[in-house]
Image: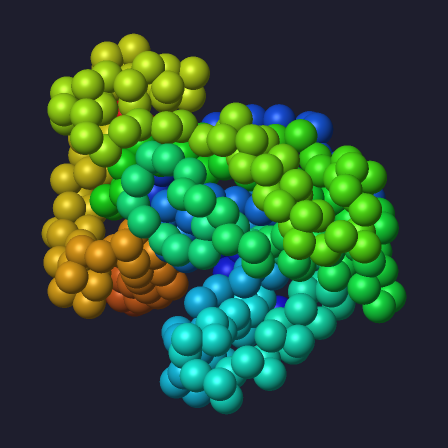
Amino acid sequence: MFYYFSRFLVRLALPIYLRKLCVVNFDKLPKGAPLLLASNHPDSFFDAVVIGSVLEQPIHTLTRGDVFRKKAAAFWLRQINLIPVFRGSEGRQYVKNHDVTAQESHDALKQGDAVVVFSEGVCVNEWRLRPLGKGTARMAYKIWYGDDALQSMKVIPTGLNYENFRGPGKRVSLNFGEAIAADDIQTSPQEYEKWLREFNEILDRKMNAEILTVPADLPKTEQQRQLNAFFDRCAAPKAKSNPLLGGIGWLGRMIHLPLYSFFQKKAARLTARSVFYDSVLFGMLLYLYPVIVVLLSLIVAAFAGWQAGLGLFVGLPLLAWVGSKY
């Protein structure tokens, strides 16, 4: 239940947080098949938020196991369908959890949900695909050829491309690539290691086709030029195209500036501006902004009547939306 409530909030909040979300090849996703989405991982938990916002079926996301260490955190992370993945380097006591992770993923696929795996195995704020680990290949192999095999499962190469990694107002391009089926791998499943290598070669090629690559050693001006060229296809409305909406947008930004500045500073302190910054900032806005709007609306309604309270309840989010677009 909490997952669906969160997804409802995300679908309301994401159009405000992002200047524009462009989804490429959504219509080419296989219909009625279990989907394993193999994605790059440039922006921490926010990556799963973006992917989950556009899919109709629930998603289950494989997530680094150390964030589940505290029971309270583990409980709430489980409520939004996150599945812990522990590395052997984190302790032998966690190795036994690998089978549990695989089984949970398999069960989710069997019931028609989607599973998201970040195939690089690490999160870095950058514009390139890092070398793939073998985790995605092993998972696909087990699902296709293990006990209770799901031969109908398709692997979807997925590319997340961000204009920047620091706060709202950015454009994001979510690209879905050509699906990989079990019979696309020519190597016999009996040759396990060779099969894994071929799978990774195919996945790497298809993921790279969906991911913007901007070398980190380029001058900032050249990086920005390449980003602008890429995101020209993800056009967003401009204030000068509509002066009235531009003025309303400016008003919306000014009204929300104190609140946003507070959350921005809080997120920066909590994350030391790490790769978790976007996720923490969006999470605080996602769950706390509605509470603040409701409380303010109730206070205004108590003193100025329910019509004024209702107007504030509807008007504040609308001003935030216009402010994010114009």
Colour scheme employed for the rendering of this structure: rainbow
User: Does residue 67 lie above or below 226 as drawn?
Assistant: below
User: Horizontal and vertical percent for residue 91?
Assistant: 43, 83
Q: Residue furthest top?
A: 241
Can residue 16 be spotted in the picture?
Answer: no
Number of numbered discs on residues: 0
Q: Which of these two is toward me, 248 or 101? A: 101
**Quadrant the C terminus occupies:** top left
Q: Which of these two is toward me, 85 or 13? A: 85
Residue drawn at point x = 66 percent, y = 59 percent: 139
User: Horizontal and vertical percent for residue 159?
Assistant: 50, 36
**Quadrant the N terminus occupies:** bottom right
Residue drawn at point x = 52 percent, y = 70 percent: 85
Q: Which of these two is toward me, 111 or 317? A: 111
User: Horizontal and vertical percent for residue 163?
Assistant: 31, 32
User: Does residue 200 lie above or below 226 as drawn?
Assistant: below
Quarter of the image where one finds residue 161: top left
User: Does residue 224 lie above or below 267 as drawn?
Assistant: above
Residue drawn at point x = 43 percent, y = 16 percent: 233
Can residue 198 be spotted in the picture?
Answer: yes
Residue drawn at point x = 62 percent, y = 46 percent: 197
User: Horizontal and vertical percent for residue 290?
Assistant: 37, 59
Quarter of the image where one finds residue 244: top left
